[in-house]
Image (tube, helix red, strand yellow):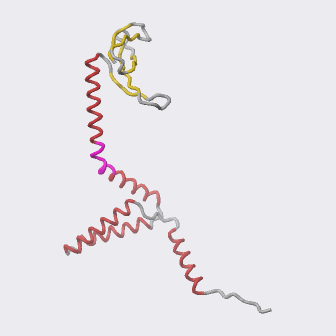
Amino acid sequence: MPTMQLQKDEGNSAGSDKGEKGMGFFRGRYGNDQFGIFLFIISLIIEIIGRIAGIRIIYYIGLLLFIYMFARMFSRNIYKRQNENMAYLNIRNRILNRKYFSGQRCQQRRQGRMERKQARQDGFGERRGGRRKDGGQKIVYCYYYCPQCKQQVRIPAGKGKVRVKCPRCGDVFDAVS
């Protein structure tokens, strides 16, 4: 009975060892993130501008940004790189969302001013929102102060002119909600 012997292929084993070594090198490294992509794009733009304009210093600044991007990518200090990325994302989001949030703030200020103006016209009250315990719609309340004992009293908004009895002193007064 003939026996077959398997021979080990020297070329394939060396190639697979290199692949494993390469994967081992990247193990524990930070890799790429949003800040790294930003650095890549900016460095590329600066390098192109430096080449077109013929100004070497601009080209070298772009090259330094490119090298810094790779240094971040191969870094083992993951905590520091994550903090850098978070700082970048905070700045980017502030810039991108500035118009959205400023519009929202203005709308909230306007709404707050209108509610305070309405409360001044109605009496002593101030409107504030609350949540229902069952997670339903938002309920808005008017807060008034008892003229006798200065206790804050909450009544539901939108009920019109109501008689309010103070829970502390029992005084009855009219309020508009």
Q: Where is residue 24 in the image (x, y as percent from the top left)?
A: 54, 71
Q: In this view, does 171 lie above or below 138?
A: above
Q: Residue at x 27, y 46 (%)?
A: 99
82 and 45: which is toward the camera = 45
Q: Where is residue 101 in the image (x, y as percent from the top left)?
A: 30, 43
Q: Which residue is drawn at 73% across and 89% down?
A: 4
Q: Does the magenta stretch include residue 152?
A: no
Q: Residue at x 29, y 26 (%)?
A: 115
7 and 146: which is toward the camera = 7
Q: Quadrant of residue 31?
A: bottom left
Q: Is residue 19 above or below residue 154?
A: below
Residue range (magenta): 93-101
Q: Where is residue 43 in the image (x, y as percent from the top left)?
A: 30, 67
Q: In which quarter of the image is residue 147?
A: top left
80 and 62: which is toward the camera = 62
Q: Which residue is drawn at 36% across and 51% down?
A: 90
Q: Quadrant of the C terminus?
A: top left
